[in-house]
Image (cartoon, coloured by chain):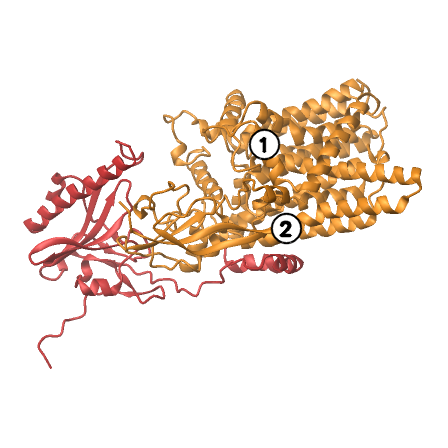
Chain colours: A red, B orange
Amino acid sequence: MSGLSIRGWRSGLVAGVLLAGLAGCGVAAPSPSPIPTPLDRTVDVDPAKTPPGVIAYISQRGSPVYSGSVEDPVELRTTEDLAKLRGAPDDFKAFMADQLAARSAEVDARLAARKRTVLTEGCDFKVELRVWGIAEHVATGRERACTFDSNDVIWAKKDGVWQRASRMQGGWDCAELEQYRVPADITAAACWYGNQGKTRPYDGPRPQRSGTA
Amino acid sequence: MTADGDSPAEPRPAAGSFAQAPFVLVLVAACVAVAGLAMTFVGAGQTGLSGDEFGHVKRLEGFYDDGLFVRNWERTTPEGVIPPNAYVYSPGTTRIMHIVNVLAGNEGTGEVSTTLDAFMVRHYVVAVMALIGLLATAGLAWLLLGWRWAVVAAGALAAIPMWTGHAMFNPKDTPVAVGYTVMTLALAGLVLASAKNRRTAVLAGGMSCAAAVFGIVLMVGTRPGMWPAVAAALVMVVVPLAIGRCLNFTVLIGLAASLVVSYAALWKLYPKVFGDPLAMLSGSMGQSTQFPHGLAAGRHYIFERTAIEWPVLLLAFMLVGTVVAAVMCLRSMRSDSRRAVVLGLIGAQAYALTLAAVIVNANIYDGLRQLLFAVPAQALLATIGIAAVATFVARRGRAGGAVGVGQWVFAGVAIAALVLPTIVQARLYPYQYAYGNVVAEWTGASILNDNWKVSFREYVLDVPQTVKAACPNDPPEGPPINPDDYSDCRGNSKAFSAPWVAYWHHARFDPDSRTFYTLLRAQRPVPPNCRVVDKVVRTRNFERAVMSRLLLCTQRGVK
């Protein structure tokens, strides 16, 4: 139902509006939104056609508006699952193994702080790392852990060492994707820009200028 | 037992006992009733959402999924075994809301929406039910005392802040109260109709039975644990009529038909629970009195909250009316048993389950809202109290010759009883359920303020898209609040989510950011790593009352 119908009902209550309007000073009922609805964009990914050096595990890139903005990521819950990372460099697999252990330790610490020893009912895993894709210097995915919120993650290789570079809930800013030079094939099809709730298509980082003027 | 129609009754069983309501009081009561309804309907659209509403939406999802009106965390038994909490609530009201939402285009059949529009439609359904409750209360007063006192009764109910406050949003307590009041009115109508000639008795009795079915299904179909209210009402009908030798076939057939059709409707409404009557009768009682499985507040709680949450003058009139109605009921048991039935039904609604809750030390919490079903009957008792005082003053005036002063003083007090709480309601709007009377305020008694988080809607514009917002229900006192302990409350459709999402559409934030927002109910202390950036404040009587706070917090001191 649209908001118009609601307003239509209200308009039938003119006397009530007058009375309660006198009574209800200060009530903030937000007016219709000035915030534009974000772009709803879906792009298929063909792993065979990704640029050299880019490994895409996902089959579809979606909008950051929806929590499942990509399809078919690799899901890692134990070190045995690392074999699913086809084509991934060994140092990234080793880094993922370290991340599984680190996130698992965080969950254990959180459970201990709550004086509990078992996972929340409904959790069928303690930690899950979802990998969307890997490039030479950057990888993307999502951290999920029982008792924690899920976060989108950018893992970046700095000085030859993989590290967790940035985390976000609800989709990436375009500036963040540009900063880490995330290839289009391993992230959502759209990104946020500015502070007005707008999105734009994301088709990869702009080419870097080379040389000097 | 006598044959139909051989015991004529007065058209108004108690009208002859009382003086007429002064016209000025009737006029003021009408204005109060209209103001209460206006605040209810406009407030239904403007006020925020309570966590209870979200809970019921999730229960309806569960109902459409597997026939059990429970949330996922309440599914504590193996598959095929009814979980205990399935007996606490029933989808009566939520299914009505669903039908209206389907008609409004917010939901498909069997789908449940968590959009703001869908919640607003649910609010309007509650408001319409509250209107029916108000009319039923006035109807009872009309049956008993005539139309002038009926208007006063409507004004008395509208003047009670907890009634109007909950009428804007409460998906369980308000419908239960409305269903109960409609049932009381219907049974009173059935009993009075039974004294008429056969044609009138059948027509009015049939309408009463239909109303009784609606009332019972709405009440028990929203909270199964209310079935003892039906049992108490049956006792209140049958016993006085039997004592007065007025129990006739019209009444018996009407009662039987109402019960059978009501149960059939309840079975159709919620087959997994009402399909096994014995399990429902025992399961609903035990679960309702213990829910939500904690320590009961103690037997004094109901008396204490009544002294806090009732307007003082109306409470005084209600106590007078209780004594007068009880005396009238007992005195007329043999001489005019139909009058005794109507008074007994009102008394039962006002006190029977409340007394039972005191005796069994039921787990009553969040003030008197679980006992909201008693409020319409208590408003009627307050009306009887006002009528009794009016009669006393009029008789004294005639005897002493000083007609003017006493009646004007009475009229002034009665008008103040209706107008003063209505003015306070307007100042608290739309959070009237946060009312505490002036004595409670002066003595520093514990007044609940916005315990339901409904005022969170007012922070929608203050919480930007790009910062985390936590809405902890009951954070520990003392230590800094840790944002990792709470999910962002814009993504889980609870009290803050629907209005926020309707405006901003989507939240995104850096989980490692050093700042985050926290929305807190007023009763909760401000954590040491937070500062207050906004408050929702209303004036209650003479003091400013904080409903809730918006805090900007940092990770400082968080371990």
In the rendered structure, the answer to whether residue A127 lies left or right of residue B372 reads: left
- For the point 71% across and 36% down, the residue is B318
Q: Nearer the viewer, residue A149 or B162?
A: B162
Residue holding disc 2 = B424
**Mark 1 Cα shell of 10 Å, populated few (<14), some (14-19), many (≥20):** many
- Label 1–label 2 contact, CB within 8 A: no
Question: The residue under label 1 is which amino acid type?
Answer: Ile
The chain holding disc 1 is B
Query: Would you name the residue on which mark 1 appears?
Result: B302
Q: Quadrant of the N terminus of chain B?
A: top right
Label 2: element kind:
helix
Residue A153 at what x, y percent from top left?
Answer: 21, 53
Mark before the other along the chain sequence, 1 or 2: 1
Is residue B436 visible to us here?
no
Count neighbours of disc 2 (C-alpha within 10 A) and say few if under 14, some if 14 to 19, many if 20 or more: many
Q: Amino acid at mark 2?
A: Val
Residue B180 at what x, y percent from top left?
A: 64, 34
Position of residue A60 relative to residue B318, above or below, is below
Q: Is residue B285 left or right of residue A106?
A: right
- Do marks 1 and 2 share a chain? yes
Residue B386, percent from left and from top: 77, 39
- The picture quadrant where one finds residue B369 is top right
Between B484 and A14, the one lying in front of the other is B484
Q: Which residue is most to the front?
A: B443
The C terminus of chain B sits in image quarter: top left
